[in-house]
Image: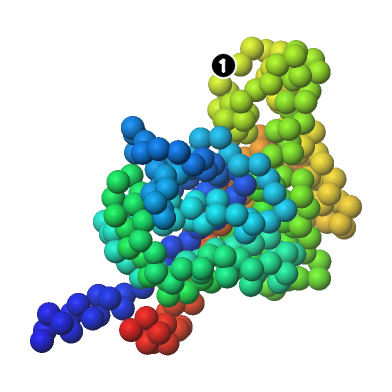
Amino acid sequence: MFWNRRKKQMDKHIEVIGIDHGWSNMKTADQIFTTGVKEISTEPAFYDNVVEWNGSYYKVGGKRLEVRDTKVENDNFYLLTLASVAKELKKRGMTDSCILLSVGLPLTRFGAEKQDFIRYLARDKEARFRFEKEQYHIRLARVSVFPQCYAAVAECIRTLPERAVIVDIGSWTIDIMPLRQYYPDEPECITVPQGLIRCMREINEECVRKIGQELDENIIQEIMSGGKGKLPEQYMEIVEGCLKRFAEKVFHMLKEHGHNLDITPVIFVGGGATVMKLFGSHAGSNIQYIEDIRANARGYEYLGRTYLASNRRALEAEVG
């Protein structure tokens, strides 16, 4: 009797997993890997980062996917989600769990894309798959979707100025979110498809024009994150010049939308925060940087746990 009651309580336990589905990298609270998926036609010789799902094998990581209009038009981001869940559960010492999946979308596309993203990720209420030869069994309690950019500062928002501008520079989009009394000023929020992938494309276009060769994106990303690498000087000049111009475009964008860079508190977050810190021309006590590339993923997990704390009984009743 005691064991059955304890097992039932364990079955109802809900694990919150936050995932940031970026076009360059998949991020969880503790994991980062490239947004890449490639089907393997036969059983692989090596199982590192291999998902076995519905009788097929898929290698995740490696070369990133090409950007598409949406993330829900094929199975790629579902497979990347399974891999992300497996990586997080492995770190937590689990292979069988009921989960609340906490994810995000760009601010200004949130309302239009939310339901499609929920339907896509919640296609299977129960999933069995293998990751790196380990069997995983997950039961989906809920998919919660939150605005990216806001998620990156949600846990620390009361430590920020009550009037500020949060700038989330991601792989594909730049979100600009003004805060008023700690709340997003939604009519003034914008999302611009001018993120770091476009910057990397411009770097390679200039490399081809001037040198006749491209750079691997991983090398460019290393420089973006503060690493100098061992590039010849002619390549470094191109990369650093393009990153400085990218930072200036972001500052110009802020000015165009009426933000005074001399006095307005500006907080840069996301993968581009380090680029702005290293290559931007503006500095001052009013400009801050949250350089953790996993800030949104950690924010989704925080917001998911907050939701679960308020709705635990209802969700556990549904699970049970």
Q: How many marks?
A: 1
Compare residues 245 and 286 and report the one nearer the observer.
245
Q: Position of residue 230 (x, y in %)?
A: 56, 16
Label 1: which secondary element: loop
In the picture, the quarter occupied by the C terminus is bottom left
Q: Position of residue 216 (x, y in %)?
A: 61, 25
Q: Residue at x 60, y 33 (%)?
A: 221
Place residue 308 in its image quadrant.
bottom left
In the picture, the quarter occupied by the N terminus is bottom left
Q: Residue at x 64, y 12 (%)?
A: 232
Compare residues 297 and 212 and report the one nearer the observer.
212
Work out whether 149 lies above or below 76: below
Place residue 116 in its image quadrant.
bottom right
Q: Residue at x 83, y 56 (%)?
A: 259
Write down the residue under mark 1.
230
Q: Residue at x 37, y 36 (%)?
A: 44
Work out whether 184 lies above or below 214: below
> How is the protein colored in the picture?
rainbow
The residue carrying pointer 1 sits among few (fewer than 14), some (14 to 19) or many (20 or more) residues within 10 Å by Cα, namely few
Q: Position of residue 305 (x, y in %)?
A: 44, 71
In the figure, is residue 122 to the left or right of 146? left
Q: Position of residue 237 (x, y in %)?
A: 73, 19
Work out whether 28 lies above or below 121: above
Compare residues 105 and 280 and report the one nearer the observer.
105
Query: From this viewpoint, is residue 108 visible?
Result: yes
What type is the residue that disc 1 sits on? Answer: Lys
Query: From this viewpoint, is residue 163 visible?
Result: no
